[in-house]
Image (cartoon, rainbow, N blue to C red):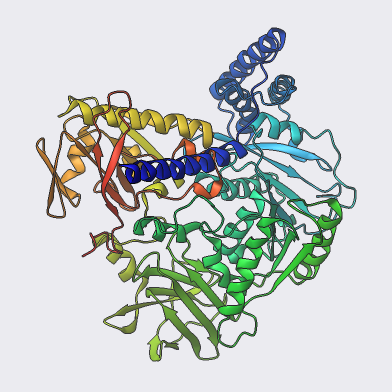
Amino acid sequence: MKKLRRFVAMMFLVWALCLAVITLSAAQYAPPPSVKPSEEVLKKIEERMDKLDAALRLFRREKIQDPILADIEVYLKAATWITQHNEFYDKNAGAWTVEALERGLLRAGLVSQGQWPWFQRTGSAVVHGYRSAIDGSVQPYAVTLPVDYGKEVKKWRLEVVLHGRNASLTEVSFLHQFNGDKPAPKDLDYIRLDVYGRGNNGYRWAGERDVVEAVQHFFLVEQRMNRAALFDNKRSVLRGFSMGGAGTWHLGLHYPDQWCVLSPGAGFTTTHGYLKDLPAQLEPYQEACLHIYDAVDYAENAFNVPIVAYGGEKDPQLQAARNIEEQLRSHAPQGSEKGGTMKLLVAPGLGHQFPPEWQKKMAEARREYIEKGREDYPPRVHFVTYTLKYPGCYWVYIWGLERHYEKASVDAERVEDGFKVTTRNVRALRLQMPEGAIRKALTVQIDGQSVTAQPYERMPNAPALIVDLERRNGHWRAVLPQRIEVGQLRQPQKTNNFQGPIDDAFMAPFLCVRGTGSPWHPATEEYARANLERFRKEWSKYFRGELPIKDDVEVEAQDIASRHLILFGDPASNSLIAQVLDNLPFTWTKDKITWNGQDYSADKHVPVLIYPSPLSPNHYVVLNSGHTFHAADFQGSNARLYPRLGDYAILELMSDQKDPLNVKVQIAGLFDDFWRLPK
């Protein structure tokens, strides 16, 4: 009995220590208490919100469109979110909210007079808003144009800046930071684009898409202003510190052909080792999904883009750069001495700091790569990926993998009579030829085989020819591009932006659909209802948008054709689940769920999965799930935002009336590359 008591006491201590670590981790990132504005300020906020909302409704009736409309609406959105979530984290946050609304009203007044002069403003930051394709929300970003922008014949490069984690960050504080009152440096010789990133999510998931959409929107605005010719697309820089450094590591190495140099400061590049409370070994499907965002796995892509990194000597986050250095030393491509160019500036005696003098040193260290610029068509590409979410680099594009979440690589060289290629874990590949290349048969030396290939146009009048190759039974052959494209439609397979896991569905336009019918079992319906509500709250709080939701009877043909469908309920309560059920890899009746030969009682279990939609090509259908990580993970380190369920799961309801979301994972995993259950 004494041994048992000692054992119980020891286990309680271990549990308490683990709980303390998790609690301290969450507390480390907790925002300060909200400071309620005075009644006078709250009244001003309410009055100005009503006035700006009325102006926007009038503009919509008058058919005023984006980008003008979004540039006004972004101010109302900021005020709505800070009040809705009570995020007045600074004593001045109320005044900043009034300031934001007044700037929105000022823009509205100018537009009513047929003017929008902020599009022409140079020499200081200007806030813009774009309407996200994911959920229709308006998201902010800021652009600082040099004083002489557009005033002389010159091309200007772009620097995209990712902010660090800020527990007090809101749309209002972001707009206040870039309100244009502070002039830009007179010697600013580039366009600066500051990304909001939908808050503090480490530029993952919708936060990743925010970076892409903000940059795309900037280009759209410049085209509308007839200034597209001013942009130098060969000298773009991606940089950031802390969380911004982590974002630079993973976005830069996932998209290495978009930048002339990456410049991360601190951050993290692995999940294991960075998260101190993480078990040494997660579930296999979770371990596999860590390869999506662990930047260290993509270190070899530095072969295609130089890195100038920074870290304080005493900063634990210096390890982020050390991880990449080690990978580059140990995985240099054959024929390359270093496997990529990387400079690491270490500040003696400094911790997690990035003072101005070191920012200046970093800028100086980047200059040689900026002056050199990015090549349009480098003679050699060495590309590594673990998922077709990130399928290519320059003129190399991977159509299909043998096995997702295992290392895949292509080392390709353009030679006089064709290409010389070595691959790993690749079953379908596209090689693009330089613009202006003559259409004639060429030879592809690939994995020790010699393949004669005829280049084709990807589409009529395309600027460059392409060669598609496919491997079957260990042998490569050249194929028509239509063969691969049609084959992917006839046989479901994982392709770019169509590869899972469940969380991937929320990086593109999606629609949550709730059932309106009578459910088979109250417990499963209560779980579906509660899970949708949790998703709605978490999306609003942590991804800064309104969750798109419709009843099943309201879903239209355009919804089905253009969006991933996220279906909540069972086949009796949700008519769309009933429509797709016959084409899903399991059976579901009132009595039981049969999954891979195993039966589960339908009154106590809920199936969760992502799968090719039977209703629309190249779209997902998702059952009973939003993001698979939740509020506690958002409130901790950004590194905690990794998938928890893979592609599918069977969840057992734990009959907890106080918490209908209390479930136990019975099975979970990943489909193979043809959306089949693994053997």
Q: What residue is rendered at 49% in x and 35% in y?
A: 136
How far across and down, in percent of the image, does residue 355 sit? Answer: 82, 51
How far across and down, in percent of the image, does residue 52 sit? Answer: 64, 18
Q: Horizontally, is 466 left or right of 669 in the view?
A: right
Camera-nearest residue between 550 and 10:
10
Q: Is residue 241 visible?
A: yes
Q: What residue is rendered at 33% in x and 83% in y?
A: 477
Is 85 drawn above or below residue 316 in the view shown? above
Q: What residue is rendered at 83% in x and 64% in y?
A: 364
Farthest-out residue, left: 591
The mark total stands at 0
Farthest-out residue, front: 2
Camera-nearest residue between 331 and 588:
331
The quadrant the N terminus occupies is top left
Farthest-out residue, right: 186
Is 321 drawn above or below residue 36 in the view shown? below
Q: What residue is rendered at 33% in x and 48% in y?
A: 620
Q: Horizontally, is 462 left or right of 521 in the view?
A: right
Q: Horizontally, is 421 left or right of 494 in the view?
A: right
Q: Is residue 627 visible?
A: no
Is 418 drawn above or below residue 614 in the view shown? below
The quadrant the C terminus occupies is bottom left
How far across and down, in percent of the image, does residue 24 sit? Answer: 57, 39
> Which picture quadrant has residue 597?
bottom left
How far across and down, in percent of the image, does residue 31 sit? Answer: 63, 32
